[in-house]
Amino acid sequence: MEYWKWLKMVVVALIMLGEGWRNEGCLEEEKLALFQLKPFFPFIDSRIDGSWYDPIIEEKETSSDCCEWEKVECSSITGRVTHLFLDLTYTLTSYYHRINNEYWYLNTSLFLPFEELQSLFLSGNSIVGFVDNQGFEKLSSKLNKLEILDLSDNYFNDSILTSLSKLSSLKSLNLAGNNFIGPNLINGLKRLSKLKNLEILDLSRHN
C-alpha cells in the first residue's frame, strides 16, 4: 500500500512539474529565434483569411507565449517548437514580392534553435536559394528530429539536392514546383539516396 501512495505522489509531482514548465510559455531562445524569422515570415502571429488571390490579413496582438502563435506548434510537455507552418505567405509584403517577381535567399541557420522541430513548411515563399554557406546541411547536426520538409513552389534549382542529402532524419520531402533544369540533376537526385528514412519524395511540376 505504501508503495502505491509513493508512486501516486511521484506521478502527481511530475505532472505538476510539467505543467509548471509549460505554463511559462515557449523557451526564450526559441522566442527570440521566431522574432528573427518574423521579417521574412511576418504572418507568424497573424490570421490569414480569404482566398489565395484575395488574401485578407488580420493582425492580432502578439501573445507573449509563442506557442500560441498562428503558425507555430509546440510540444505540450516540453513547450519546445515542434512544427512551423511558414507556407503560403500571403501577407501584403509577400504578395508584393510575387507580383513584382522578387526572390530572396534563405539563411537556414535561423532554424538552428528549434532542436525538437519535426515539421517545417516553407511552400510558396519565392525562395531562390541560400545565403552563402547557409544551406540545409547546417541543420543536420542539431535538427535530427526533422521528418517533414516542404519546399514546394519556390525557385530552387537542383543545387539544393546536395544540401538536402545531409538531413538523414527526413521521412517526407516535397520539392514540387521548383526549377530543376540543371545538367547535373541526375547526380543530384542520386545524392538523395543517402536519406535512408525517406518514404515520400515529391518532384512533380518541374521544367
Image (cartoon, rainbow, N blue to C red):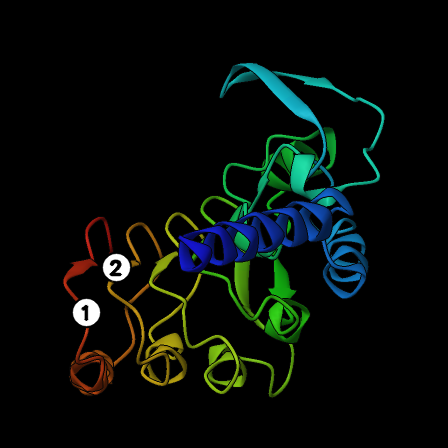
**Residue in the image at 81% along x and 33% along y:** 63
Q: Is residue 110 above or below residue 4?
A: below
Pinpoint residue 116: horizontal percent, then vertical percent: 51, 65
Q: Is residue 30 above or below residue 137?
A: above
Q: Amino acid at mark 2?
A: Ser
* Quarter of the picture holding the C terminus: bottom left
**Residue in the image at 79% along x and 50% along y:** 39
Q: Which residue is mark 2?
A: 172
In three-dimensional space, the C-alpha distance between marks 1 and 2, rounded to whole angstroms, equals: 6 Å
* Circle 2: element type: strand
Q: Amino acid at mark 1?
A: Leu
Front residue of 144/172: it is: 144
Q: Is residue 29 left or right of residue 19?
A: right
Nearest to N terminus: mark 1 or mark 2: 2
Contact, mark 1 vs mark 2 (Cβ under 8 Å): yes
Q: Which residue is mark 1?
A: 198
